């Protein structure tokens, strides 16, 4: 995985961060991500993120569950092991509704959770780079990805002007990898440059 350069700005207030996100996008910087300790209404729109397709995946998983349930029950009770239960016909669709519904919900729920974990790269055995240790505690952290056209000194000054209380330049991998958090990676030990606001 390639190591990229990022300019990381730390903000104290939600309103300051919200305005900073808008100004960073207007200035043409590539916004990597914003980390907040709580959900901020409208931040996804300000960042230019599109709506999630997770609900579409949930619908596909649900239809798959319905198909599997109806196909399995039909084959078991009509073809493989037909049993006369209280004089009911072998193809008793109304009696199959509860189990079909429950299996549909099970497939949709489990499928959406696994898809969400995959898309967000969440798992107990993977490691991701943390841009700031207090990003999910009480700080609002904005990360700008440096491209060929980005001057990290100018970006740092720009973030400081927008109200960032702490700005630094970091080198990190954007993906996830197998590892442990109790052992510091030597790759990034000497690659953080701090710029005081």
Image: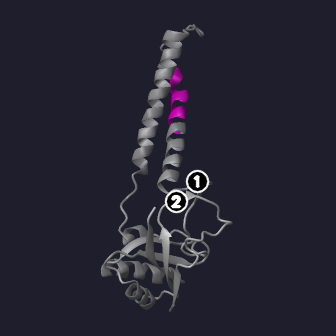
What residue appears at the point 41 percent right and 82 percent down from the top-left corner?
A: 20
Residue 138, given in percent of the width and then of the height, sits at 60, 77
Above or below 70: residue 3: below
- Residue 13 appears in the rendering: no
Q: Secondary structure at mark 1?
A: loop
Among the 4 quarters of the image, the one containing residue 148? bottom left
Report the magenta residues as a range.
Answer: 95-105
Whether label 2 touches label 1, CB < 8 Å: yes
Dot 2: element:
loop
Per the image, the residue denoted by label 1 is 123
User: Residue 176's mark?
Assistant: 2
Q: Residue at x 39, y 46 (%)?
A: 56
* Residue 103 is covered by the magenta coloring: yes
| Front: mark 2 or 1 | 2
Q: Residue at x 49, y 57 (%)?
A: 120
- For this orientation, the residue located farthest to the right is 182
**150 or 33, which is in the foreground?**
150
Reading the chain from its start, which is encountered first: label 2 or label 1?
A: 1
Residue 108 in view of the camera = yes
Give neighbour class at mark 2: few <14, some 14-19, many 20+ (Cα, 10 Å). Answer: some
Instruction: Please state the total of marks drawn on the protein image.
Output: 2
Q: Is residue 133 left or right of residue 174?
A: right
Report x, y in % for residue 87: 56, 7
Q: Position of residue 30 (x, y in %)?
A: 36, 73
Residue 26 falls within the magenta-colored stretch: no
């Amino acid at each position: 995985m390639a190591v990229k350069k990022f300019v990381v700005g730390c903000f104290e207030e939600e309103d300051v961060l919200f305005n900073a996100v808008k100004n960073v996008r207007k200035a043409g910087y590539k916004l990597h991500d914003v980390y907040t300790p709580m959900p901020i209404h409208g931040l996804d729109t300000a960042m230019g993120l599109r709506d999630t397709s997770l609900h579409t995946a949930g619908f596909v998983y649900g239809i798959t569950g319905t198909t599997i349930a109806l196909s399995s029950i039909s084959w078991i009770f009509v073809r493989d092991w037909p049993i006369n239960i209280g004089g009911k016909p072998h193809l008793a669709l109304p009696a199959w509704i509860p189990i079909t519904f429950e299996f549909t919900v099970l497939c949709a729920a489990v499928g959406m959770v696994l898809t969400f974990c995959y898309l967000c790269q969440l798992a107990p055995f993977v490691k991701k780079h943390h841009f700031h240790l207090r990003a999910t505690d009480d700080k609002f952290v904005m990360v700008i990805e440096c491209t060929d056209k980005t001057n990290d000194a100018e970006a740092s000054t720009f973030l400081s002007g927008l109200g960032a209380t702490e700005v630094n330049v970091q080198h990190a991998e954007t993906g996830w990898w197998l590892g442990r958090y109790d052992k510091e990676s030597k790759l990034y030990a000497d690659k953080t440059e701090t710029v005081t606001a």
